[in-house]
Structures are given as C-alpha cells and as structure tokens.
Amino acid sequence: MERTRTRPGAAVFLMLILGHLGNALEVPLDPKVLEELAQPPTITQQSPKDYIIDPRENIVIHCEAKGKPHPSFSWTRNGTHFDIDQDPKVTMRPRSGTLVVDISGEKAETYEGIYQCTARNKHGAAVSNNIVIRQSRSPLWSKERNEPIRVQEGEALVLHCRPPAGLPPPIIFWMDVNFQRLPQSSRVFQALNGDLYFSNVLKEDSRNDYICYARFPHTQTIQQKQPITLLVLNLDAVNETVAALFNETDLFSDGLAEERKPTFLIPSGSSSSKLVLRGQVLELECITEGLPTPEVSWSKLSGEFPDKRTSIVTFQKILRIVNVSDADAGEYRCTAHNRLASVHHTIRVTVKAAPYWLTTPRNLVLAPREKGQLICRASGTPKPTINWAMNGIPIENSPEDPNRKVEGDTIIFEEVQTGSSAVYQCNASNEYGYLLSNAFVNVLSETPRVLTPANQVYQVIRNNHALLDCSFFGSPIPKITWFKDSQSSTLEGDPYLLHENGTLEIYVAQAFNSGKYICVARNTLGIAENHVYLEVKEPTRILKQPKYKVAQRNRNVVFECKVKHDPTLIPIMIWLKDNGELPDDERFLVDSDSLTITDVTENDAGTYTCIMNTTLDHDSASAELTVVEAAPTPATIYEQPDPPTDLELTDMKPRSVQLTWIPGDEHNSPIHKFVIQYTDSLHDHGHWHNLTHVPGSKTTAHLELSPYVHYSFRVLALNAVGLSDPSNPSHMYKTNPAAPDENPSGVKGFGTEHDNLMILWKPMSGLQANGPGLQYKVMWRQKDVDKNWTSVTVANVSKFMVSGTPTFTPYEVKVQAINNNGIGPDPAVVTGHSGENLPVQAPDNVQVLVLNSTLAEVHWEPVPPKTVRGHLKGYKVSYWRERSLHKHNPHRVEQQLLTFSGNKSHGMLPGLQPYSLYLFNVRVYNGKGEGPASSNLQFETPEGVPGRPSFLRITNSNLNNLTLEWGPPNDLNGHLTGYILKYQQVNNSNELGPMEELALPANKTSVTLPNLKYSTRYKFYFNAKTGQGAGPVITEEAVTIMDEVLMYQPSVDEVGGVHPAAPAFGNVSSSVGENGMLINWEYWGAEKHVYVEYIVKNDNTLGEEEWQKEYVNGSQAYVLKGLKEGLSYRVRMVAKGHDDQAVLHQSEELLVTVPAMPSRQVDIATQGWFIGLMCAIALLILVLLIICFIKRNKGGKYPVKEKEDAHTDPEFQPMKEDDCTFGEYSDTEDHKPLKGSRTPSNGTVHRDSSDDSLVDYGGGDGQFNEDGSFIGQYSGKSSIRETAEGPSPVNTTTMNSFV
C-alpha cells in the first residue's frame, strides 16, 4: 500500500482531476488553485429558496461569492432593485453580499418578499435563487367553550383538534391535564390532520381532560385547546335519561351495544386519488369504524411495495413511502375487516416531479480559439422548460456573439475570443418548481503549472503499486511526461501507467524503482516541471513467530516474536490477547521481541497475537496458550516431531540446488515449518548455520548457494512443542570458485606519524572470498591533486603503510578483493588524512573581559587552518593567580587549565579569586598535541565579598553579658569595611526570638554584649563585609549563667570555642541488675544529643577522648552492658550541641563498682521450682492489682495508693512474662500518661513534683529479701522546673517506708 512521508493538501490535489470535454479544460472551484487566476464570480453560499424567519431575531439573508477580482453585490426585491442604502435597518457585510436586517422596533412582516442576489466583477455576473422570505407564525387558539360530549357505548367518535393555521404547520399531539400522552391503539388513534378517532367507544374512555396540543417548531412554542369532556353511556343509562325526559320506560332494549360492519371514515367512499411529488414522502391514510374494531391491511394492485422505503405505522392505519420515485405511482388498496364483513378502498397515486438535474452545467476554462460547450439537462413531470441567461440577462436579450450558438439545453462555443468570459445561468422550471445553476466560461491564456508540492517524498513497500502525483493546470491543456533521475527517455509502457490526471503508476515497485522522478507539463505557452522522490522500503516480516504453549498453572511462559523490518522505518510492537488488549496486569511483561507471563492462571489461556506496525505496513503472528493443572492428565501426549529422513539433492546448478526430504512423525502436533541448516567443511567444518526455512506443508526447498563452499545440509522440523533433532546430513555438494562478490568493509585511512598514511580494512572470511588465492588491491591518491591511483596488491594482511606523505593531507583510498578467478566489484572510495604534526602558530589578538569578581571571558582570534597541521581539537587556556592586590599579601596559586573543544574563539574562566592579579595564555591543540602559547596577559579581578571570619569565641560569660572574640577572614577579597553581628534568644523548645543586629568597625576583634537575660541560650550570627557586600556567616551559641555560685569551668570544643553551661543534670544514680549496670539520671536541658560516658577508674593509659559513650536521647535510664566484674568505672552524663561536637552540659562523675560473681554459683533463675514460684507470685500480684483497681474505681483509697498516685514512676521496670524477672528499661516502651501526670505538647514526659524510681527510694542499690519484698526507705528527689527561669535546686525529703 502506498504511503507518503509528508503530503500536505494531498486530498485536495487528488481531487484535481483534469479531464476535457471536447477541448475544454475543467477547473475545480478551489481557491488554492485559482487564487492567482482571473475568474468570473461563483456563488458559494446562499439562503434556502423558502426561508422562514423568526420574528424575534434579526433577518440574515446569506449571499457569498468568490472571483478574481473579488465581486461586488446587489439585490432585487420582488423583481425590482433593492437599494439598501435607503434603509437604515439593512446592512451588507464587508466583502460579502449577506444582508442583515435589524428588526428592532419594526415588524418582520415588513421585509417579507422575494429576494435575489447578484455577484458581479469585470468577467461576468452570477445570480442566486429566488429567496422567498416569510415570517413564521404561531397564532393563538380561538377561544371556545366545549360542551361535554355524550355518546352511547360502542358508537364511533371523532374529537376534532382544528389548530390555528401556522407557518410552518404545527405538530399535533393529545395529552391529559398531567401532560401525559393519551394511550392510543388500533381502536383509538390520531389521524394525519390531528383529530382523535375512536372506532368504537368504551366505558373507560370517559374522562374530562382530552386536550389537543399544537407545537410550532420554528418558534418552539406550544399551545393547547380547551379540555374536552367525554361521557360514555351504556343502554341502561340511556333508558333512565329518556324516561326522565319523556316519561317513558325501556325505550331501548336491554343488552350489549349492537355490532357493526366496518365503514371508512377517511377517505370516504370506495376510491380516491392522491398526488405526490418525486422525492417527497407519500402518506396514505385509512380510518375506519365498526364493532368489533376493524383490522386494516395494505396492498398495491400494480406491483410490490418498494423495499427499505416503505413502513406501515399508526396501528396499520397509515402507509408511508419515503423518497418517492416514478415507480411508486399506481393503485393502492386499503382493506378493513372484522368478524362481520370486509370492505375495501382504492387510492390511485399519481407521481409528479419538480425539475431535477440530469447534467448540471460545469465551469469551462478555454484558451483563445478553443471550442467548448455548456450542457444543462433536467427532467421532471411535466418536462421542464430550459431557459438560458448570460450575466443575469436572458440570453435572447444579451449581445450577439457569432461564436456562440444555443441549441435547447446546450450552448456551443466555437473559437472563443479573449474578453468573451461570462457567467451563464440555466433555469429549468415546471409548475412544481425550478432549478437555477451558474456556470462560467473563462477564456484564459496560462502557462503550465504543476500543483503537486515540490520535492514530495513517496514511500511504498516493495512489491506494492506506487502512485506519483502530478496535478497540473494550464490553458491550453498541458501534456504530461515523466522522467527518472537523469534519463532522457520518457516513462511509458510496462511497468508504468500514465493516468489522464498526470499521475504515474508503477504496478509492482521494486528497490531499483527508488529515486528522483521529474514530471514535465507542456503547452504552447510554456513548460513547467516538478521533482518528486520514491523510496521503496523492505517489507516487515516476523522471522521467529510465537509458538504454541502448554503451561502448568503458576509457571512462567515466554512468547518470542523476532521481526525484520526496513531500518529506515520505526517499528511499534503490539501484543493482543484474543484480539483485544492485554490485561492490565503487572504479570504481563512486554519486551522488544518477547512477551512474558508470570504465574499463569486459567484466565490467561487464549490466543496471543504479536503485531509489528510501521508507518507503511505490518505483520502479525499468533500462538495459543493452554493452561493445565500441575499434574496434567496423560490423555494426549504432545511431543516434538521426529527428525526428517531421506535427504536428497536434485536440480544441481552452480549457484543453487533443490533439497527434498521425508517428514518424521508429528506426535499429535502439526509441523509448522522445516528449518534447513548447512555446514561448510572447507572453511568452517563442524559448525551448522541456518540457511532458510519453509512451511510445514512442504517437503522441498530451493536453496541459493555461494561459490567455493563444500555444503552439507540437514533439516529440522518444528511443531508447537519444539524443534526435532537434526536429520542425518545430506551428501556433500561442492560449488565452483568464482570472482569475489564483495570487497572488504571497514576501510579507513589515517596517519600514525606526520609523514605516513595507514590504510586499514576488515579482512574477508573464506566464505566471502568465493575462491582460493584471496588478495587485496590497495589503492590511494592525493585528493584533488592526483588523477591516477597508486596501487599495491597484498595478501594475508589487513593494513598497509604509505610513507613519505605530506603532513595532514587528504587522500582517497579504496581496497578491492581479488582471487584466482577474478577481481571483485568496483570498491567504494573512502577519504582519509595522512599523519598530524604539532600546530605552529599561537592564537593572535588575545583579549580578556572581566565580568565580575569571580568570572572573566577570554577572546582570541582562531589560528589559520593550515597552521593547525591536523584535526583541530580545540583551544587550551592556562591561567594562574599571581598574587592578591593587597600589598602585604603576596600569593601564587598553581596553574589551572581549561579546554574548549572545537573551533572556538572565546571561553569563560570561572571560580576566580576576587581582588587578585591573574596571568594567562592561549594555545591551540590537535590530535598530535599542543601548539605554542600566546604571550602571557594579565588582568585584575575587582573587589568581592569577604570570606567567613577565621574564628568566633564566646568568653567571659556573666549573669547578663557575654564577650565575643573573632579573627578577620582569611580571604579578605578587598578592603574590609566592618563586621555585622546578629543574635537572638533560643528557648527550651528551640524556638527563636527576635533578631538583634550590631554593626562593628573593621579594626575591632572583640565586643561585650551587656543587658542580656540570665540563664538564657543565645545564637550568634557573625560575618565580615567589604564595599561589595557582606560575606558568609559564622554562627555560635552560648548560655548566660544562672548564678555565679553554680558556675563551673566551661568546656572547650575541638575548634577552640568556649561554652559556659548551666546545670542541666540532676541526681545521677546506679544499681546493679542481672543484665548490667542500670544508670538513672535527671535532665532538664533542651539539647537532644545526650550520652552516658564511662571509663575504667585509674586507667591512665586512656586519654580524655577515649571515654566510651552510649547515645541515650529521650530516656532517663540506661543499662550499661559488658562491664568487667570487679572493676570500678567513672560514669558521667554529657549533652552536646547540634554539631555533636561541643559539650554544652555535663553531670558530676559517678563512681560505680561491678561486683564479682562466685566462680561456682548455680544460676537459680534456671531452676524450674524458682521459675514456677516467680510465676505464681506474678499471678498473685496481678490479682491484687485488679482488686486494687476495682476498689479504687469505687472510691476507696489507702495511704500507699495515694503516694503512688502522687509519685508515679515512669521508669518502673516491667516484669518479663517469660522468666518473671524485672527487665531492663527501654525507651521504646509505650509510656502512657498515668492519672494525675502531665504530658507536654512536644510529646516528651517531664517529671512532675515527684518522679521516683525504686532505686531512688532506696538511696542506692535496690535489694530484695528472700520472700521477694523490697526493703528500703522512700527517699525520692523532687525537681521543680519553672516556666521562665532555669532549673531550681533539688530538695530531698524522707518518705514513708514500703514493706
């Protein structure tokens, strides 16, 4: 199938079918084609002939036309000129003939009438249809009073609607007072005139809301008739009514209503006639009455009803035929019958026809002295009359033209003259309507032009037909000829076909058909040509199709789909399941050439299709997946086929042979294909290669062979299960040697030294050699200098060195294969260069532009190409900082190098040091190395912002002041103008207070800040500034002390910063547990980095930095494990700052001793009786706790319980369930607030007025007696933390003992 790469407007130009009638040129009405041609007017849009307007909206009467020059417009109204300038309510749109009538304040009926538009330019005049403007009308229903209708049950009845006459006529329907349509049936139904007919009335027809509605479609208004009341009387009611009026009884006999034969209500009588126009809708109506309700049927006496155009609606009452034709004329019979009788009515249908076109006159474009004719043929009943006009004037009243002759429905032109262009109107009319058509005759002298876009590219798949467009225009009609590439002969005859519209068709496109095609258009006035290109692409083929798979449930399945396609086309792989999209499931993995389904289920069974699409074609292949249980039933065994047998070689030729074989057993799975493989015992003995494959239905293969190969063949069969074993090899078939079919690939030329040329190529294999004695003819010559080639023949090598060449000179090289049987084809020419040498010239006109204090831009003039003497790689800029511009600060930095690849003439030097003197130079480099450097130039960087101060210390901390010391920046980067100090408070939740700022002179190195708040943390921000602005900030934190009595020696951090600290740690205690040493402490600081540090006592070998530390943030107890028995340890608590370096708080040291354990001690915790005892005690304690909890909820309290409520201990050790021992404390436990405790908003639990542990109560190590009771005194410590001040001193109180 033919495709094109870019075809803008292709659909338009394919419509430009240029034929000829006589010698006339027909031109489509397309502005793109005719925009530069003189053209008489053509009406392009007009309002309908019968134009009903809405009186509520402005009147818009359309009239649009085109022509060259653009036409002017005029109107007639009721046959006379309509001067729109005299009516302020009427305007004409710019460059248009459309009229807009503003009816505000006017009655629309004022503008009713017959309008006609004329579009005129210097080449003629076109006229529109007669447009009849009428105002839509929806008059009100006349007021009337409807008396109730009384009718005897079983009688026929008609409820008249009689809607007001509207324009267009209204649509009638019957509804009740609730706007619900009244039910209709074969007994009760609506006629075409809107009346409601009852074939016979029943008692249930009585109601008081029979309402007829009329909907006027143009104005979308609905009006209703007054409701009609219907009273249906049975015979008993009639007797009572008569008796009351006439004093008579039983005027009517008792019983049901009397049955009646069918009678026609519409139409009346036994026959009638109907006139209908061709193309309209024929509706024949038969309305009957009778009791029982008659049934109606239809037939045509003179033929059959037309198929697909006939319908019988309204309960068989109406026969409808749409799009009536002459064949629908004839007699139609309506039959009504009930069980009493059957009656007939015959309707004679006559079909008339308003005029309709047989041949519409078409525009003519003629060259001077050409012939042509306009044909206007119409039909109708009665036969229409044809009248001609020229430029809107009857032709008999137009100027005489000896070259024009009117013969009924045809105007014949003979030898037209320049200036005789005009628009002709054909009017076909009879008593039922008219048709009006404009057609121009345009006399032009135009040179040929080709309308197909230039250089258009057509793409087609090989073996498909190709269509090359050559849409053209010219007057006289041009003649089209086609040429290919630079050939002088025209393309005609097989395989080419030239169409009348200029299109060139190639029946079966092949690769050699690719190329440039020239379309030439000629007439007597000139010539035009256009170039298009044809690209013949290789078809898309699936080489390895997906195979039939039988997979067990929950296994993986892989479908392979390997595709070959034209490399210039972009392929898109699509997988389908059962012709639909793959399930949206991550188990389906689509790769470039496979589909993998993991963990297959029964729902995955089905047919999977691999589709490879390109922009021009596609190919597809399918395979079925069957999912079975893990243990499949052995009903049918599917196996790979047996290998083929009896291989035989026939029809042996120098380059081909025919191979036949006998297939093996298929094993219940049909063979899909046979794979033919070969081995070459001469060049590649023992290795088998795929040669081709054939469908499973074939047992022969025609094999194309190469020269000088000792072939042996074998065949493999493939079915849904897999490949068979290979067959036994065939007899050896030796092909004769021949000259090479190809030359070496990968040929290139380059130099290794400045005076040589190395020619390299990829050696050919024995299979490629086509014969013995393979050699290579190496040829070279200096490009654009030498005409003759220098050559040498070599063998068993893949390179050749040419010496004595000029430096970096282009050479053309080629390598040709030769063997004992001849030479290979003419080799391709490759351009290379001899060796490079170092550049000999430095860049000139080197300049520098300093952009800012850290960036400069270097410019240079590129060196002449001849001086590079090699491939220009780029330029290198060397630069270094000679010194700072401060006189007292000489400095020299190591040289830096920036490389700019390519033929650049400028580059940026980033990362410069401000306020410094720099030197630089530029040099060019090629593949060989660098050339000489330019002269050293210097530039100065302007002043910049300074670096950060060298240090910042806080000293002399007092209650309300601090002293800060600092050092100037190491990198001044200019003249220092001062310092900026900012500081702010930091509360316990690390929230920052308002910022204070202080400006300091450049000659100061310390400052004391007075009037600070005592026991408060401050954060300081300090930086230096020059004339260019402030530099980076250095920060520090410090705390003013709470009281001079509590001050202790500040700690010094690693960088020399001194931090005075207020006490943040309270009591630190220890106790010996089974798992290690339990350390408890109190902490009120805000820092988050808290550690337990410990070291062996009297260990002088370890320095201060060798303290062991454990991170315990968020906890107030920790178990130190791994301590050695019998040793004493120094333990302390430490809180560090955000950088985890500076020590902000430190507790007093605590000395703890790890007791030594007896060497032969029995672990009582492992004894069964002890474990049972502990579990019993734990159970008893649990029962007691439950009882206490119940009593407490009832209001009962006791002294110990009150103390527990007042001194809740969050560090109390829970008892482990597995061994009934007390476990170590862990901060990962779920600490829920106890009754009476307070939990801060930040999520941490602070101690209340008394937070005591068991160890705290004992004042030391906690001990248990033999019965497990705790011995000791309550000696809790209380700490009160105030809101605004620091921590208060700790008081110790004595509590009641607990036994």
Image: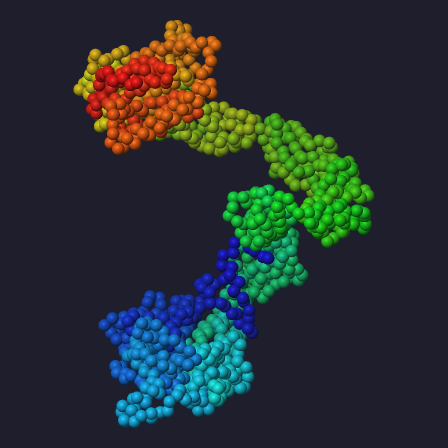
Q: Quadrant of residue 150?
A: bottom left
**In which quadrant is the N terminus drawn?**
bottom right
Q: Quadrant of residue 499?
A: bottom right
- Is residue 561 visible to the viewer in this orientation of the structure? no
Q: Nearer the viewer, residue 1198 or 300?
A: 1198
Camera-side residue: 265 or 209?
Answer: 209
Residue at 50% x, 83% y: name it. Answer: 298
Q: Seen from this angle, which residue lies furthest left?
A: 1011
Q: Quadrant of residue 118?
A: bottom left
Q: Position of residue 401 (x, y in %)?
A: 47, 79
Q: Residue at x 42, y 9 (%)?
A: 1156
Residue 630 appears anywhere in the view: yes
Q: Residue at x 56, y 51 (%)?
A: 576
573 sits to left or right of 970: right
Name the one closer to the observer, 830 or 458: 458
From this view, report whether residue 857 is shown above or below residue 355. above
- Against 909, residue 378 (above or below) is below
Residue nearest the viewer, comparing 491 with 1117: 1117
Can you give x and y, in whole percent of width and height, for residue 1037 in the image? 28, 20
Horizontal side of 431 relative to 79 (left or right) equals: right
Q: Is residue 737 above or below residue 1193?
A: below
Residue at x 63%, y 38% (from the top left corner) = 830
Residue 169 x, y percent position in the rendering: 35, 78
